[in-house]
């Protein structure tokens, strides 16, 4: 009997790269003429995987967010990896928004991936294991077809394929 091949579908973000992007964006905000004295801030909470942006107005907040997104893209972090909350009022007439950095695949998306792969009628086994999805098969060609299919789909989060063996 042939040994099964497998790979894991995960959604992970390198928090060190996010930290570097936040530091670069903070530095740019402090130096840019139009944002210098606006008292805009970017704070990263590594424990909660959250980025908090605050600014005196909606317009300035969108500029600060654009600066941060530019830095994230330059550090090869997918924009879909950060889910932005709604803009809320803060003290002193300022506004704030929180961006949640995605780490892991939540159960609902994992079930959707599982269902979509099974609907392809390929000879593969799909298992949900915590915050990742393991796909295994006797044929590497089947696994590569699953990878190609998942790359073409959009689940709202960036997907990586690891432990291909």
Image (cartoon, rainbow, N blue to C red):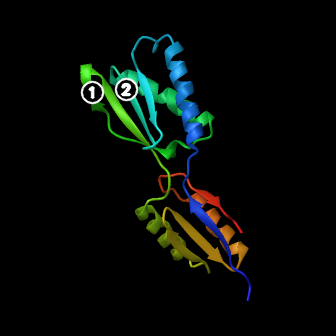
First along the sequence among labels 1 and 2: 2
Separation of marks 1 and 2 at Cα, in angstroms: 8 Å
Q: Is mark 1 on a helix, strand or loop?
A: loop
Q: Residue furthest front?
A: 47
Task: Name which residue lies at 44% across and 30% down.
Answer: 43
Q: Quadrant of the C terminus?
A: bottom right
* Left or right: residue 65 compared with residue 12: left
33 up-or-down from 150: above or below? above
Residue 119 visible, this orientation? yes
| Residue 72 location, quadrant | top right
Q: Is residue 130 above or below residue 127?
A: above
- Which mark, by number, is residue 54? 2
The image position of residue 135, as x and y in percent, is: 60, 71
- Residue extending furthest toward the bottom: 1
Q: Residue at x 69, y 80 (%)?
A: 138
Q: Which mark is residue 90?
A: 1
The residue nearer to you, when weighing 101 against 15, is 15
């Amino acid at each position: 009997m042939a040994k099964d091949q497998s790979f894991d579908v995960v959604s992970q973000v390198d928090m060190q790269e996010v930290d570097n992007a936040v530091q670069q964006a903070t530095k740019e905000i402090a130096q840019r003429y139009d944002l210098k004295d606006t008292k805009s801030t970017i704070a990263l909470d590594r424990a909660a995987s959250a980025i908090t942006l605050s600014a005196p107005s909606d317009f300035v907040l969108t500029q600060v967010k654009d600066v941060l997104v530019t830095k994230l893209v330059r550090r090869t972090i997918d924009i879909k990896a950060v889910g932005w909350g709604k803009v809320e009022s803060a003290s002193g007439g300022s506004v704030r928004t929180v961006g949640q950095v995605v780490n892991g695949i939540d159960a609902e998306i994992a079930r959707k991936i599982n269902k979509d792969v099974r609907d392809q009628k390929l000879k593969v086994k799909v298992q949900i294991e915590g915050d990742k999805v393991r796909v295994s098969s006797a044929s590497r060609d089947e696994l590569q077809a699953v990878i190609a299919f998942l790359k073409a789909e959009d689940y709202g989060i960036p997907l990586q394929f690891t432990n291909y063996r």
